[in-house]
Image (cartoon, grey):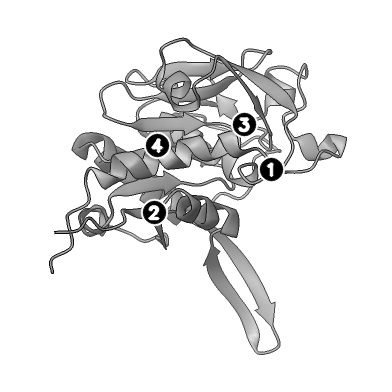
């Protein structure tokens, strides 16, 4: 029987859309995510925030992409106060993504976690976050490159990659030039995660879950870069390749 393309579930961001006939709450996934998955040979499917249904979701996908977006509620990592810079909290999205991460790790489902996604991965497995890098950690690097007028497709700093790590095997290099659009970052690493890469200010930029076949978290946005910088298609290609191992053949 021929193999089918692996299905990759993508989590979207909430938004409000005002039309002439009313204001609507919508869930949106940037086309950069879906195009990256398609370019890597997968089938992108958007998974809206919902309460429950986790077993049903993981039963129909071969891999997961936890996408970027607003901030996680600080209560979920034991921070009693919400920093003034913390924004975009959406409880139902937090609930869905944390449940998906835990289910994926327990069932060994391949997963790529991008920007907010690396933070969700860390929180879901027991880690904590810096709520605002510039205020609570360091201003050595501007981690929101738009403040310096740098395009989303272009790199703004480097990441030193740990030799032999999943990130090193995925990109095939010991240094990656990346873009940057975040103001939060990992503080305390979850016990089951391993640091794979850091920026020059020692902000955690890449992690993996050694107990799984393939779970990678990156703090940058490779989906915005892969067309102009083809090396950034590699994490999507690796995700799809691992997911293909889970995909059942098509009956004919």
Q: Is residue 250 left or right of residue 45?
A: left
The residue mark sitting in front, 4 or 3, is: 4
Labels 3 and 2 touching (C-beta < 8 A): no
Q: Is residue 25 left or right of residue 146?
A: left
Within 10 Å of the Cα at label 2, are there few (<14), some (14-19), or many (20+) other Cα atoms? many
Q: Secondary structure at mark 2?
A: loop
Labels 1 and 2 touching (C-beta < 8 A): no
Total tally of numbered discs in the picture:
4
Residue highlighted by disc 1: 228
Q: Which mark is residue 238?
A: 4
Residue ID at (22%, 55%): 3
The answer, for residue 75, to whether it is visible in the render is: no
Q: Nearer the viewer, residue 127 or 193?
A: 193
Q: Secondary structure at mark 4?
A: helix
Residue highlighted by disc 3: 184
Q: Which mark is residue 42?
A: 2
Residue ID at (77%, 27%): 142
Q: Secondary structure at mark 3?
A: loop
Q: Position of residue 155 (x, y in %)?
A: 72, 32
């Amino acid at each position: 029987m021929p193999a089918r393309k692996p299905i990759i579930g993508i989590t979207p961001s909430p938004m409000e859309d005002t039309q002439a006939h009313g204001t609507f709450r919508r869930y949106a996934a940037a086309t950069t995510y879906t195009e990256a998955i398609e370019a890597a040979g997968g089938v992108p499917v958007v998974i809206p925030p919902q309460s429950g249904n986790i077993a049903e979701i993981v039963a129909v996908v071969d891999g997961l992409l936890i996408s970027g977006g607003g901030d996680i509620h600080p209560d979920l990592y034991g921070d009693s106060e919400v920093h003034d810079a913390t924004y975009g909290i959406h409880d139902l999205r937090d609930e869905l993504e944390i449940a998906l991460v835990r289910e994926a790790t327990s069932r060994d489902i391949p997963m790529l976690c991008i920007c907010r996604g690396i933070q969700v991965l860390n929180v879901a497995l027991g880690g904590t976050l810096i709520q605002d890098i510039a205020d609570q950690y360091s201003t050595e690097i501007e981690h929101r490159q738009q403040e310096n007028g740098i395009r989303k497709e272009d790199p703004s700093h480097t990441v030193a990659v740990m030799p032999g790590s999943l990130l090193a095997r995925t990109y095939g290099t010991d240094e990656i030039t990346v873009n940057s659009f975040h103001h939060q970052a990992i503080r305390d690493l979850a016990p089951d995660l391993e640091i794979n890469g850091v920026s020059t200010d020692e902000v955690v930029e890449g992690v993996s879950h050694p107990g799984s076949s393939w779970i990678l978290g990156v703090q940058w946005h490779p989906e915005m870069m892969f067309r102009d910088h083809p090396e950034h298609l590699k994490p999507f290609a690796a995700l799809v390749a691992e997911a293909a191992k889970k995909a059942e053949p098509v009956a004919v």
